[in-house]
Structure formats: C-alpha cells, structure tokens
Amino acid sequence: MTEQPRTPNVPAKPSLDGLEEKWVRAWEDAGTYRFDRTRPRADVYSIDTPPPTVSGSLHVGHVFSYTHTDAVARFQRMRGREVFYPMGWDDNGLPTERRVQNYFGVRCDPSLPYDPGFEPPEKPDAKRQLPVSRRNFIELCERLTAVDEKAFEEMWRRVGLSVDWNHLYTTIGDESRTASQREFLRNLARGEAYHSEAPTLWDVTFRTAVAQAELEDREHSGAFYRIRFHGEDRPVYIETTRPELLPACVALVAHPDDERYRELFGTTVRTPLFGVEVPVVAHRLAEPDKGSGIAMICTFGDITDVTWWRELNLPTRAIIDWDGRLVADPPAGVPASPYDELAGKTVFSAKERVAELLRESGDLDGEPRKISRPVKFYEKGNKPLEIVTTRQWYIRNGGRDAGLRDELLERGRQLSWHPGYMQARYENWVEGLAGDWLISRQRFFGVPIPVWYRLDGEGEPLYDEPIVPAEASLPVDPSSDVPPGFTEDQRGKAGGFVADPDVMDTWATSSLTPQIAGGWEHDPDLFGRVFPYDLRPQAHDIIRTWLFSTVVRAHLEHHSLPWTDVALSGWILDPDRKKMSKSKGNVVTPMALLQEFGSDAVRYWAVNGRPGTDTAFDTGQIKVGRRLAIKILNASKFVLGFGEVDAGAEITEPLDLAMLAALAGVVGDATKAFEGYDYTRALERTERFFWEFCDDYLELVKTRAYGEGAAAQSARAALRAALSVMLRLFAPSLPYVTEEVWSWWREGSVHRASWPDTDELPTGGDPAVLAATAEALRQVRKAKSEAKASMRADVSRALVRGAEVGRIARNDLTAAGRIADLALEEANADLTVEVTLAPTE
C-alpha cells in the first residue's frame, strides 16, 4: 500500500546536489533493498545479475546495461514482488591476470617456489616482468581485485543500483569454486565432461587453449605463395598463405570432381625443400575455384586441416610450439636440413626464411601476391590463433550430439526473449556448433580442475585413471592439496600422483551464477525460493557464451531452464558508431559524468536505450535528463505549495477529472511496457505526460488551486494525487529525485511504495476536456506572444470556435488566460481562438 501523506516539509531551495550521498546512506541504513527470504517463491522475483569483470574500471557501457536491469528490479519491487537482486564480481581469468602483470610488473612462473615474504617491485616494469611463483601471483591477483571491487561497489551504489549487498559473491571465492568444482565432478560422473588429446585452437601470447565461443574473425594482411611440389610426371602447384608449414605437410588435397587432378589421386608427390613424399587425396571440402584448386594439408594450419586430418586418417607432423615458435626438432620423416634453419623461429621469421629458400631452389613461382582475408583470433588476443595438439577438458554441449543439440534448441524456445528477435541468435549459434565446449585453460588465476592423475612405474600420468575428491572436501587446489590415499611426498614421483595443471575457463564458473548466488546445495532454502530465476539480463554479444553455457549447465544438472525470461541490452557506441570497449581504448568512465550531471541524469540517458538496441553515447541526452530531474523538484514544490487538502475532499471539477483520466491511461501504458521489459517506452510515456502536466494543467488550475472552497480543494486533491502517481512512475528510472520529493510529504520510501494502479484514480473524467482547454490556452498565449505582450496581459475578449468547444473548462481557461469575456461557438472544424487584448495605458 502507498503511505499516507503528511504535512509537506519542502526545502526552500530544492537541489539535486548531494542527493546520491544522502539516499545511498539512507537506503543502506533502512535496508530498503534487503531481500526478505521468508517470502514464498510465488512472491519472489529473482535476477541472475551479470558479474562485471574486475579488471580496471567500469565504463558507461556498464552503467547503461545495469541501469536497465535496475529499472526492472525497482518496478517489480513496487509491484509487490520480493526482489532477489544479488551482485557478483567476475574476478578470475585473463583480464585480471593481464592487469596484475602490468600493474605489479610480474609474470607467473609455476616452476618457482612460493616466497611468503614477497613484495612486488616498487617501480614495476611491464616490459621486464619479474617471474614469481603461482601462489605469489594468485596472492597479487587477490590483492588487486579487492581494491578494484571496492571501487566497483562505490560506483554501483552511486549509480543507484538497488541490489542487496548482503548477497555479494566473487567468481573466485570459496562458494564459487565449490559450486564450479562440484558441478564439474557431476558432469564427469555422468559422462558429460571428458578430456581428450586433440588439435586445439591456441593463443600463443597467453599460451592457452581457446573455445569456439571466444573466437572472432579479423581482417589480416598476408600473401599467397605459389609453390611447386614435385610429382612423378609433372610439377603440382599449390597456393598457400603459410609456406612456413611446409615441414608439417602431410598431403595434398583436391575436390573429387576436379578433372585437373583426378589422375593424381592415389599417387604421391614430394615436398619442396624437404623432399618428403605425401599422398594426393580427394575431399569434398577442397575448393576448385580457390588458388590452383589443390591445397596442402598441414598439421595444423586451420580448422579445415583438422577436418581433413581426422576424416582422411592422416599422420601428424606438428611443428608449432605453445609459444608460437617452431619446435627444436623436425617431425619424424622430415630431414634435419634445412629444418634446422627454422627451429626456434617465430612463425613470421620462419615464413620469411622458407620464402627465401624457395626462391633459391626455384620452387617459388613468381612473387607472393598480397591479400587481406579474415583470420581467427582469440577475442582478447592480438595474434592469429595457431592449432596445436594438447590435452584438454570438454563438456558436452550438443556440438557432437544431435540429440542434446535438439534439447538445447528446445530450451531456447521455452525462454521468453526480450526483444523476441534475439532468439534467432541463440538458435544460429547452437545449430552452428562444431564441437563440444572446451573448458580448460592453461592459466593461473581461476578455479582449478579438481583432478589428479596416478603416475605409473615410469612416472607417466595415467590419464584414463583420474583421481577426484569427495564433494565434501571442496574446494580443492590439486597443485597444493593431496588426493585421497596419497601423501605430499608422493607428488611427481613414479607410483605417486600429479595434479591436473589447468584451471577452468571463466565461463565454466560464470555459467553457474544462478547456482552460486542462490546458494545451491549449501543453502537449499534460499535456492528453493529463487531458482529457476525470473530474469537473466545481459548484453546481446554474449548470447553464445554466457547465456548458452548457463542453459547447458542448468539443463544437465537440473533438467530445467535457469530462468524464464532473458532481457538483452545493446552496445554503447562512440561518436564514430563503434562499440565502446576497454580493449579499443574508446571508453568513457562514468564517475565524472555522475558528478557533473547527477546519477538520475545519467540513468535517464541509459533508460532511453531501447532493449537490444545499440545506442550512441550522448551527453546531450544526459543534460535533458538533468533538466527533467530539476523540473520534477520545482514542479513538486509548486504542487505542494498550494495549501493543505481537507480530509474527505473530493475531486469534482471536470478539468481535474480529465487530467487524472489521462494519467490513468499513462499508468496503463507504463505498466504494460514494464511487463514487457520495455523500460524505455514506460519512461517516454511518463515523461511526455509530465511535461504536458506542467505546461498545461498546472497553468490552467493554479488560480483555482490558490483559492478557497470545494473547487480549490478539488484542484489540490487532484494535484497531489497526480504527483504521487508520477513520482512512482518515474521512480524506477530516476530513483534519487523521486525519493527526495517523496520524503517531503510521505512516510517510508517511494521504492517500497506500491506501483500506481488505475483503480486509485477517480473515474468519469474525459481526457478530451484537458486537451481542448489546453489547446485553447496555447492559442491565447501564442496571440499574446505575437503581439509582444506579457503572458499576464489581460484579454478583453476571446472567441473559441470548433467541434470541441463543448469540452472547454470555461472557468479555468478564463482565469489562466486572464480573459474578461470568453465566447464559445460550436463549428465543424479544428479548434481556433480569436483573441482581443485589453488596451494598455
């Protein structure tokens, strides 16, 4: 229920300054947004809040999307739902490691022993990073993220997020590690997690495997080299962008229908420089119209090489190491000379040397032809990906299982998408999966894979006999914890054990945010009240990663969706219409904006970004938001300054009833918009009415409202009823100014007040009365303006003609226009007003 009004206590000079500090403290002290966990699930509205990556500072893109979520949370709270709105920090993974390396001037070297007294250099050198043990490195990660997280919380509080800070989690905390490892062990027990040694997309800078969801194509300059292979009867020319992979060549391939090469199928040719015999094979993926129509298969140059290698059962000649350099020794069957000239070189340097050798041997036909083509990169990397053979952990996600893929597609159809067209992105991703989800990473600051391996008598790991911990012992770190039945002195020794060295991909933890925040397994009472959640808000570009992976984990573990609704935000674009991101260096940090314009103004800009739509950063719209907030202060002071409303006062005047009838329509529209997650439409509708209220109704009614009697009481009661409703309509978007005004004359918080309902407004009003009267007043004022007269100038006579004259609120128009003689004349035409100004002395 809405709190009853009291005698207003309005500041002499209302101001937006200082509202954030005042109300952030008041909300915390009063527990305004604290979740009441005694409420049944039917009364709860739970939000799976995105945990922002803690790797520096937030930018306006974060403020943009998180404000959308907060507006929805505030609306649901006012609708009577108990809102479970936690916050998390995504503090593990590559972004944090990179920040720590640059900030402290260190790099992790797992071979080094732990130094309990280690302190980072006083003057860090990011280019000459000091090697430290894994444990020391992790401690530095924890130290820096603690600082960043404090700054993040301060920022979110100032923005006005109505989260319950008692439900704060981190993706590297004990509960998160426990949940992640528990789910991994259950995936493993059910056969959904497995490890395999296979070709893997690899980032040589970060020395880690990369999943399909983390790839992006970028235009990359290169060149085609036309190279001669030596056949029995004739030379065979191939065109390649990667001549340095000649030592890794295992076959040539052409399309089975290509007449140019059909006679070569089943024969062999010799590689230039190395003289290795390789077969000529046929495969449907070969492209006759690309280059010479025949290609070399190398292990491995790209994804197609992997397909050919697997389907044609070809040998492996791997030459690229984890650091992007050519390995020291040539593959079996490849001569040491001239390979020894390439060993240890970077891919770039090896390419240059091979090109020189090909020129010298006469096997390079012409000069390289420069091109630009899309190449796969790790989304956080700056070098093209390589493919190396490694042992990795995977979780089944439908990429190799048509039945599971269909089940996950059906889960997507069960979701309510806002906006609806985003569902197609989910389906396109699932249908295009080429393999299972690679979850292991060769990094340090993450959730460890909770597995050890037995060592045989020769000290070799028995990968088919993994040792796993009991769930009760979680979380564990296999690099320092000992598996059941072993002792520490058996680590790394024949007959003993060795730890799995990898950590989980950050998405493997973030995909469990509903379980982590909801207390899965360790707080079943809470989990039962919030899961499945009502809402997952997120950006549209991580549908393929965060959204899909969360659906996968909930489907496998709970046989359900993790939430019922998904609301997608767009990107923030810079003035050049490019996505704003820290990696591109084109971000705007929000604190200065919040201080200059106020949080409500920045939130106004954010809420005007429609669901799923990319939005340009615009300080002009932020300024509009500030003007709106100031107008709310001033108009509210004006409304509350007319005098008290008598107990039992009734709203009887046609103009008052008309205004409230129009407001009832706004309430209906805004409610419907919020129910459809269209917070932008709700704000637009409310704002439009508010300005019309200020420009039209206030001007028409103020003379009567200052008076005495029943008509004056009707005006005052209508004004206060409208103010109460408008403050509540604005509250989800502009929490500070609405709370401030509410406190002038109401008990409690506007954010715990009930959302307005049309039933609380009187019936019987005709909105056309206000529209017609306001239009007549506008024309009277226009006539005064054109005559260069004051708006307070008297009008001796005004004649109003039109079809709507019967709806004119005569007395209010007369008073507002200072009209001595008002004549109304019906006519089958639009409303017009003839104005005769009173003579001036």
Image (spheres, rainbow, N blue to C red):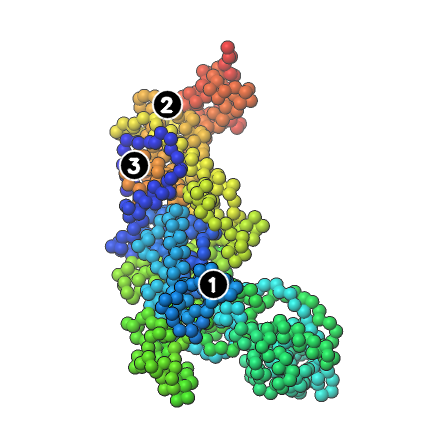
Q: Are marks 3 and 2 in contact (CB under 8 Å)?
A: no
Residue 491 or 714: which is nearer the viewer?
491
Q: Return the residue at label 2.
A: 704
Q: Are marks 3 and 1 in contact (CB under 8 Å)?
A: no
Q: Return the residue at label 1.
A: 105
| Image coords of residue 841 (percent x, y) | 50, 10
| Image coords of residue 711 (percent x, y) | 34, 24
Q: Is residue 129 visible?
A: yes
Q: Residue at x 57, y 81 (%)?
A: 328
Q: Kindly report which numbered mark, 3 or 2, lies closer to the viewer in this rendering.
A: 3
Q: Return the residue at label 3.
A: 746
Compared with 354, 820 (above or below) is above
Neighbourhood count class around disc 3 (C-alpha, 10 Å): few under 14, some 14–19, many 20 upward: many
Helix or strand or loop: what does disc 1 sit on?
loop
Neighbourhood count class around disc 2 (C-alpha, 10 Å): few under 14, some 14–19, many 20 upward: many
Q: Residue at x 32, y 30 (%)?
A: 717
Q: CA distance from mark 3 to mark 1?
A: 55 Å
Q: Amino acid at mark 1?
A: Gly
Compared with 579, 438 (above or below) is below
Which badge, 3 or 2, is on the more N-terminal residue?
2
| Image coords of residue 70 (percent x, y) | 39, 49
- Return the residue found at the far front: 122
Q: Amino acid at mark 2?
A: Arg
Helix or strand or loop: what does disc 3 sit on?
loop
Image-quadrant location for residue 633: top left
Which badge, 3 or 1, is on the more N-terminal residue?
1
